[in-house]
Amino acid sequence: MKNKIAMLLMEAGVSYNKQRLHQAGYFRELLATSPEIDEELRSLLRLCRENVGRLNKTEDALVRLLEHDPLLRERVERLMTIPAVGPITALTWALEVGEVQRFSCIKKAVSYCGLCGDEQSSANRVQRSP
């Protein structure tokens, strides 16, 4: 939705601040002060912005629910002790991977997550896939 809003504005020739575009106040101001935006486009942009807001609220509610789930809470808290792992990454890992004990070694867990490419080696030649 955010990309669609940006694309619609670009197609209409509207200049905007990319960093501030999805802030509610800036977006309202942009709609009110840009003569390049006709009424049809304005209503479409408002609809897209409403969808962004709804999706954000839904995501926030889902994350809050999952963070308070007793079965996930401990695992999520443990995962978040890893530097750069926040609630979304921790929840994704906990929900997608399941019980870590099912992997006999870290190499298998990394492979399951697709964090390493395949390696084909023969003699002195090593070829890695993305």
Image (cartoon, rainbow, N blue to C red):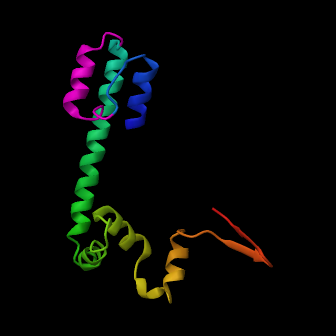
Q: Quadrant of the C terminus?
A: bottom right
**Horizontally, is 61 left or right of 121 in the view?**
left
- Residue 63: which quarter of the image? bottom left
Does any portion of residue 1 appear in the rendered image?
A: no
Q: On screen, 28 above or below 56?
A: above
- Residue 68: which quarter of the image? bottom left
**Could you tell me which residue is drawn at 50 percent across and 87 percent down?**
105
Instruction: Pinpoint residue 91: horizontal percent, then vertical percent.
Output: 33, 68
* Magenta span: 19-36
Does any portion of residue 129 appear in the rendered image?
A: yes
State the residue lying farthest toward the top: 35
**Could you tell me which residue is drawn at 27 percent across and 59 percent down?**
62
Q: Nearer the viewer, residue 86 or 12?
A: 86
**Could you tell me which residue is drawn at 40 percent across and 29 percent down?**
6
Q: On screen, 51 above or below 34?
A: below
**Horizontally, is 94 left or right of 67 in the view?**
right
State the residue lying farthest toward the right: 123
Instruction: Pinpoint residue 18: horizontal percent, then vertical percent.
Output: 34, 31
Q: Quadrant of the N terminus?
A: top left
Q: Nearer the viewer, residue 27 or 115?
A: 115
Q: Is residue 105 magenta?
A: no
Instruction: Pinpoint residue 40: horizontal percent, then vertical percent.
Output: 36, 16
Q: Nearer the viewer, residue 9 or 56?
A: 9
**Horizontally, is 101 left or right of 62 in the view?**
right
Q: On screen, 78 above or below 42?
A: below
Q: Is residue 25 magenta?
A: yes
- Residue 95: which quarter of the image? bottom left
Q: On screen, 74 above or below 12?
A: below
Q: Count of labels shown?
A: 0
**Could you tell me which residue is drawn at 31 percent across and 28 percent down?**
17
